[in-house]
């Protein structure tokens, strides 16, 4: 195990110890390592995250050297870092806020459901070729449903142990 992988596992343990009791909502250790492997090796990316809960996946992105803008409408977020910008709001409002700020993103991690009315706003905030990763890419779960909604804007989806990975078309 690499030093970065060990740091991610330790940070995840800290999050689970300090979370407010719904530990099953944090992504698994295996999911953390898979996300780290997808994000590692890229130059610093600006990542949008929809659905963060405690902030576990945002923590993984920061350990991979990236900066994250994330949202979730809850009082559970606990992993604070200067490279994580957390917004306690639903995705529709978050996307509007990101547009007003003039941000464009190199990647996205979707662990929440994109509403139909959010799809075009989401795509406009992504750079051509941006990496899109969904969690819960199994059966009829939200990861699959998000990629169905994004189908005309993305390349082929690849599956990695419950995560889906695609890119915004150039």
Image (tube, helix red, strand yellow):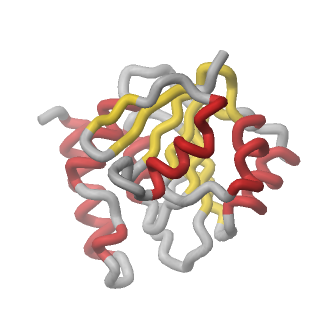
Up-down relation of residue 6 to residue 38 (above or below)? below
Rendered location of residue 68, percent (x, y):
56, 45
The quadrant where residue 124 appears? top right
Question: What is the residue that sits farthest to the left in this orientation?
Answer: 1
Residue 22 at least partly seen = yes
Up-down relation of residue 148 to residue 25 (above or below)? above
Picture residue at 33% right of the left edge, 50% below the top: 138
Rendered location of residue 136, percent (x, y):
37, 53
Residue 83 at least partly seen = no
What is the quadrant of the C terminus in the image? top right
Q: Is residue 58 left or right of residue 20?
A: right
The quadrant where residue 89 appears? bottom right
Q: Nearer the viewer, residue 164 or 36?
A: 164
Q: Nearer the viewer, residue 82 or 143?
A: 143
What is the quadrant of the N terminus in the image? top left
Up-down relation of residue 60 to residue 168 (above or below)? below
């Amino acid at each position: 195990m690499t030093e970065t992988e060990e740091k991610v596992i330790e940070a995840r343990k800290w999050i689970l110890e300090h979370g407010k009791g719904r530990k099953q909502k944090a992504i698994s250790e295996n999911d953390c390592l898979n996300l780290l492997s997808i994000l590692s090796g890229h130059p610093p990316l600006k990542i949008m995250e929809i659905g963060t809960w405690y902030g576990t996946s945002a923590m993984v992105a920061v350990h991979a050297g990236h900066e994250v803008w994330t949202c979730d409408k809850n009082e559970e977020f606990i992993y604070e870092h200067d490279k994580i910008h957390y917004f306690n709001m639903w995705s529709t409002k978050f996307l509007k806020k990101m547009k007003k700020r003039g941000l464009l993103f190199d990647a996205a991690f979707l662990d929440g459901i994109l509403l139909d009315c959010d799809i075009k706003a989401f795509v406009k905030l992504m750079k051509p070729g941006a990496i899109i990763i969904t969690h819960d890419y199994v059966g009829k779960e939200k990861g699959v449903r998000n990629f169905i909604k994004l189908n005309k804007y993305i390349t082929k989806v690849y599956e990695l142990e419950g995560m889906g990975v695609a890119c915004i078309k150039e």
